Image: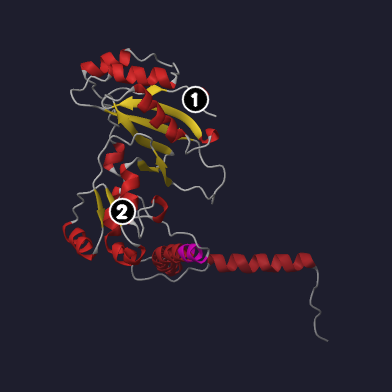
Amino acid sequence: MPKKTSTNPLDEEKLAAAEAEALASEPLETSAEGQNIDEKAEAGLIAEHGADADQAVPAELSAIKDDNESAKAANGEEPTVKKKSNPKSQAPNKPKITKTKQRSKKYQEAKAQVEKGKLYTLDEAIELVKKISGTKFDSAVELHLKLTKKKAKGGTESSKGTLHLPHGSGKNKKIIVLDEAKIDEIAKTKKIDFDVALASPSLMPKVAKIAKILGPKGKMPDPKSGTVTDEPKKVIEEINSGKVEYRVDASNNVHQLVGRVSWDDAKLKENTSAIFTAFPKSRVFAAYLTASMTPSVTLDLGFLK
């Protein structure tokens, strides 16, 4: 009968330990240099894997970077840009030098006669402006209005219009009536030697040729100002009798000539009052009267109705 194999766990452990001891006592094969073959193989394996790892890491990082840039592009983000240092930005900021405008001695003397913060009546302002005007020529007297902003967008209020000064503006205006020859001349020379240009409605398509020349100077014929007309003689008479055009600039200001320093106070007052009639009281924020090369005098608006 065959022998029964022991199934005792203790016997199996003893048998495994004996086999391990026998293997450990046997000599290992070495190379010619006396190096253990297993150790050499292990070293070669490490070197081989190490070389592969050194080459794989940069490519792996590059692939990750490319994936990140692609993801940013897909999300609509801008790609990463390496910022270069700007040597100018590192330089210390230089202090800004603000130049103060130097006024003449006459201007300083005139300014000293205008009480700071005081609101002058129209009569007082006219008298003071004529007093402090020290020019050798007949200075112009001007009214400057600061208007409030429009309450609603898209309103019908125009940025320009016309009004009548009872005594004229004190300036003789050169008025011309445009024709094809004059249009060609202006287009060629770009010279403007007139104050007001009139044109008939039928001529306006040809006047458009010089719109970029006349427009910035405020000389372009316009139906709102009455300078587009089939009755040029009538318009010329109206202008010579005191019809003037006013404009509201981008800052809501109006600058209008009202006469000369040599005029009677009554004439200056009537012309100045006529300008206020073109604007409702609620639109006038502030008003100033001044003459050529003099400080302004602030008006008291209590007289407005």
> Which residue is under mark 1?
301
The C terminus - image quarter: top right
Specify the principal SS of the magenta part: helix
Instruction: Count residues near mark 1 (Cα–Cα under 10 Å), then give few for <14, some for 14-19, many for 20+.
Output: some
- Label 2 sits on a secondary structure element that is helix
Q: Residue at x 35, y 60 (%)?
A: 230
Residue toward you, 103 or 69: 103
Task: Tell me the mark number nearer the camera, choosing from 1 and 2.
Answer: 2
- Dot 1 amino acid type: Leu
In which quadrant will I find the N terminus?
bottom right
- Disc 2 target residue: 233
Residue 65 image point, x, y percent: 45, 62
Q: Residue, x 16% and y 57% (percent of image)?
A: 189
Please state which of residues 178 and 29 is positioned toward the viewer in this rendering.
Answer: 178
Asked if one can make out residue 248 in the rendered structure from this viewpoint, the answer is no
Task: Return the x and y of residue 150 as percentages of the image width and height.
Answer: 52, 42
* Left or right of residue 42: residue 110: left
Element marked by disc 1: helix
Of residues 275 and 216, the one nearer the viewer is 275
- The front one of 258 and 236 is 236
Q: Is residue 219 magenta?
A: no
Which residue type carries mark 2?
A: Lys
Read off the magenta span.
68-74
Can you tell which mark lies on residue 125?
none
